[in-house]
Amino acid sequence: MKLVLDNKELTEEFFTDTRLLGVMAPVKDYQFCWHLNTSIGLNFRVNNDIEIKLIKKKRQYFFAVYEYNEPTRFLSHYVYNNQFDGEYLLPEFKHLDFLWLMKGDEVSDESLQETIQTIRSINSVQLVVELTNEKIKNKEHLVF
């Protein structure tokens, strides 16, 4: 008997209770996270263990993931770099530089709007938009 990994089910499970934001900010990922850490008081750190590796056209592409866990909740925040060497983690959102995933605890609409406003207040940020699951074609690229 052969066991087959159901990626669709895994992906759906991964995205249960998540909120996802797309951010346009033409800066390096470490600069963006530095701005988040200094202006919002978060503590994003790069997590090389969950870096996303995609293989396209016989080449490997590595997308950095920064992680921050809220000390008083089960909520974790992940900032993905959407671009590496001309390839995109989510090709359907080429205009976005970063993807911000909130996972592990419920995020109310009010709380999400506050986060969006806070991100917008950072100088280098040009756009912040919520990405709903229906709009994302390559969701499995975000699963670590």
Image: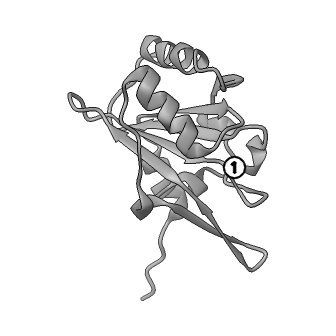
Looking at the rendered structure, the number of numbered marks drawn on it comes to: 1
* 57 relative to 27 in the view: left or right: right
Q: Quadrant of the N terminus?
A: bottom left
State the image quarter where residue 67 is shown. top left
* 2 relative to 24 in the view: left or right: left
In the image, 115 versus 13, the foreground residue is: 115
The vertical placement of 140 against 74, above or below, is below
In the picture as drawn, the residue positioned furthest to the bottom comes out as: 1
Q: Secondary structure at mark 1?
A: loop
Point 46% across, 57% down: residue: 10
| Residue 96 locus on image (x, y percent) | 71, 38
State the image quarter where residue 71 is shown. top left
| Residue 37 locus on image (x, y percent) | 42, 31
* 24 relative to 108 in the view: left or right: right
State the image quarter where residue 26 is shown. top right
Residue matched to label 1: 90
Point 20% across, 28% down: residue: 72
The vertical placement of 4 against 9, above or below, is below
- Colour scheme used in the picture? one colour
Amino acid type at circle 1 is Leu
* 96 relative to 99 in the view: left or right: right
| Residue 18 locus on image (x, y percent) | 45, 35
How many residues crowd around disc 1 within 10 Å: few (fewer than 14), some, or many (20 or more)? many
Point 43% across, 49% down: residue: 13
| Residue 29 locus on image (x, y percent) | 58, 44
